[in-house]
Amino acid sequence: MVQKKICMVGAFATGKTSLVQQFVYSKFSEKYHSTVGVKIDRKEVDVAGTQVNLLLWDLAGQDKFQGVQNSYLRGSSAIFFVVDGLRRGTLAELANLRTLVKETLGPVPSLIAINKADLEPQWEVTQDDFYGLLGEGCHVLKTSAKTGMGVNQGFLWLASQALKG
């Protein structure tokens, strides 16, 4: 069995923990619990006939990214960036986080999830923002930790990309 580490990176309260919980346990909670440091979950998946043990590192909200958290990124096979569609500021923070990841890891497969798609009519992140990220060559996906929309697709895509690297 192959083992791959995927780090969840984004501003606080974007839904990183909820996405992991939906993927690993098929559960969603309306209660907000701030992650302190890092929380690690595992899930075995089949990627084109290869069994992959995913280690999902759910990092604390990155608004105040500190050097110690930088070390959590090391050894990552892929990065799952999360933006809150309801808060445009989390999209602005994404650029800083992408730069930090690139400086720390170099090029690694990554996905940008614009989360809370179940509330899309209320989003501050626009379709132009979405298409702008696609235009930069980013793999972008709308997700909803609440409904499960795009969650499995995102993790499985990252797992397949990590296997190629």
Image (tube, helix red, strand yellow):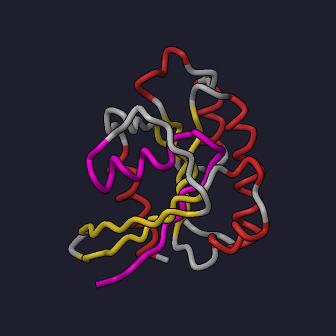
Q: Residue furthest left?
A: 49
Please state which of residues 72 and 97 is positioned toward the viewer in this rendering: 72
Please state which of residues 26 and 35 is positioned toward the viewer in this rendering: 35
Instruction: State left or right for residue 55 relative to residue 12.
Output: left
- Which picture quadrant has residue 29? top left
Identify the residue shown where x is 78% and y is 62%.
66
Please provide percent x and percent y for residue 27.
Answer: 29, 44
- Residue 21 shown in magenta: yes
- Residue 137 shown in magenta: no
Identify the residue shown where x is 63% and y is 21%.
124
Instruction: State left or right for residue 76 relative to residue 94.
Output: left
Q: Residue furthest top?
A: 121
Please state which of residues 49 and 82 is positioned toward the viewer in this rendering: 82
The N terminus appears in which quarter of the rendering?
A: bottom left
Relative to 14, residue 6 above or below: below
Please provide percent x and percent y for residue 40.
Answer: 46, 66
Instruction: State left or right for residue 134 relative to residue 104.
Output: left
Please provide percent x and percent y for residue 85.
Answer: 57, 29
Identify the residue shown where x is 60% and y is 33%.
131
Please provide percent x and percent y for residue 39.
Answer: 50, 63
- Which picture quadrant has residue 106? bottom right
Please state which of residues 21 and 119 is positioned toward the viewer in this rendering: 21
Total labels drawn = 0
Relative to 121, residue 104 above or below: below
Identify the residue shown where x is 72% and y is 33%.
89
Q: Residue furthest bottom?
A: 1
Instruction: State left or right for residue 124 relative to residue 57.
Output: right
Relative to 162, residue 124 above or below: above
Range covered by the magenta-colored residues: 1-27
